[in-house]
Amino acid sequence: MMQPAPKGLRIHIGIFGRRNVGKSSLLNALTKQQVSIVSDVAGTTTDPVEKPMELQPLGPIVFIDTAGIDDIGALGGLRIEKTRQVFDRTDIAVLVTEPGIWGEYEDQLAEEVSSRSIPVVIVINKSDTAAPGDEPAFVPEQYRSLTVPVSALTGTGLDALRQAMLASVPPECLEPPAIAGDLVGPGEMAILVVPIDKEAPKGRLILPQVQTIRDLLDSDSFCMVVKERELRSALDRLKVPPKLVITDSQAFLKVTADVPKNIPLTSFSILFARYKGDLVKQVEGAMAVEKLKTGDRVLIAEACTHHPIGEDIGRVKIPRWLTQYVGGKLDFVHYQGHDFPEDLTTFKLVIHCGACTMNRREMSNRIRKCNELGVPITNYGLAIAYSLGIFERALEPFPAALEVYRAGREAMKKK
C-alpha cells in the first residue's frame, strides 16, 4: 500500500475566524468531504480538525480547521489556546469572515499572522448573501487585495480561493532544504546505521530514517542500511569509503568506535536539527550542558505522542547521560505533541527531539521563542553527542556549526 506524505512534509494551511462564519463549511467544500461537523450552533468545532490532502499543482498539504477565537467561558479558553497553537505551524492563514463582519477579532487575527510573517488570504464566506460588488467594502483597505468572496454553500469562488492559496505559498515551502543529499552528492555512498530494538516499529523503519533514504535517492546518491553490529563488516567490504556515516544517536559510541576518523560521521537527529530548524542555534544550545548544575530544570520536548516503553530515549537515556555528565540530579519536565510551555524562563535548557513529525515552521517558532527568552535550546542528537564527549566528531560534516562550537569552547576557556 502506498503511504501518504507525512504531515511534517506538508504545507499547513490554517483556517481561522470567529464562531459560525462557516470555517468548517468552507473546509468541507474545499475538500469535497464531510471533514468537520457543521451546525447552526456557534462553537461546534472544539479541537483543531486536520485534513491532509493533495492540492495540485502544489502537492501534499494539510488543512487545519480551528475553533472560533471569540469563544467565552472556561471551555472557550481551552479552545482559544488550542487555536493559538495552530499559528505556530501555519504556513498559510485563511482568515474567514462574512459580509459586513469585521471587528476587533479579525484585526487581532490579521495582526497575529502579520507579526509572524504568515501569508494570509481573506475569505468572505456567505458572499451569496451580499449585494453584488459590496463584498470587500467592509474589509480594511490594506487587506482588500488579499480578499476572495466565496460561498461554501454554492461553491462560488472556490477556484479563486485555491489559486489565491497557491500564490501565497512561501518560497521555503516550495524548495525545502536537503536532509543529507548535499553532504553526500551524486554517485557517492552513505551508510545508515539503524538499530533494531524494542522501540523500532514492527515491519518498518522510523520516519527520519525513511526520509533520509528518500532524500539520498532524490540526490542520486547510494545508501547502505545496516545495524550497528554489522557496520564494521560493511565498511571492510567496501572498495571505496562512504562519504558519510549516519547513525541513530543512541548508537553513537559504538559507531564512533567502528568508523575510521577519515570518514565523516553524524546522526539522524543532528541532520534534522539542520533540516527542521537552525543547527547553529542548537549547537550553541548544546553547549549550555556545560553550565548545568544539580537541581536545574530541563525541558524535554517530543513532537510525537508515542507511548514510551523500555529504555525510552527522552525519558530514560538522555536524563541518565546528562545526569552522569553533570554529576548531580536534574529536574526533567516532559512535553509531547503540539503542547509547549508559554513560560520557558524556569528552564536552564530545552532539549527537543528531531521534530520529524512537525513542519519546519513549528520547530522554527519554538527555537525563536527560546531565543527571545534567552533559554538555550538543542536537540536529542546534539545533547547526546555532547554528553558522551563526541560532539566535535559529530559536527565534522557541518563546518559552520563546528566553527561556532570551537569558538564557544575558546571563549569558555578564557572565562
Image (cartoon, grey):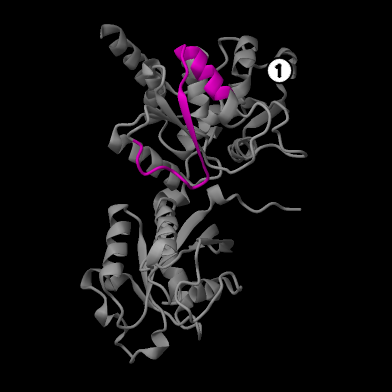
Query: Residue at (25%, 82%) from the top-left corner?
Result: 137
Looking at the image, residue 102 sits to the left or right of residue 153; the answer is left
Looking at the image, residue 211 sits to the left or right of residue 387; the answer is right
Q: Position of residue 161 (x, y in %)?
A: 44, 72
* Residue ID for mark 1: 231
Query: Residue at (35%, 59%) from the top-left corner?
Result: 119
Amino acid at dot 1: Leu
For mark 1, give the secondary structure: helix
Residue 347: quarter of image: top left
Q: Position of residue 151 (x, y in %)?
A: 45, 82
Q: Is residue 251 above or below residue 274?
A: above
Q: Position of residue 32 (x, y in %)?
A: 59, 74
Visible in this render: residue 176?
yes
Furthest residue to the top?
413
Query: Residue at (23%, 73%) from the top-left corner?
Result: 140
Q: Of 219 and 332, which appears nearest the observer?
A: 332
Furthest residue to the front?
74
Q: Of 210 and 330, which appears nearest the observer?
A: 330
What's drawn in magenta, residue-wise?
317-344
Q: Of 406 and 357, which appears nearest the observer?
A: 357
Q: Is residue 188 above or below residue 252?
A: below
Q: How many marks?
A: 1
How many C-alpha atoms fall within 10 Å of the one at disc 1: few (<14), some, or many (≥20)?
Answer: many
Residue 28: quarter of image: bottom right
**Magenta span has 338?**
yes
**Magenta span has 6?**
no
Q: Is residue 258 above or below residue 99?
A: above
Visible in this render: residue 58?
no
Q: Position of residue 286 (x, y in %)?
A: 42, 23
Q: Of 375 and 135, which appears nearest the observer?
A: 375
Query: Residue at (58%, 37%) from the top-left corner?
Result: 219
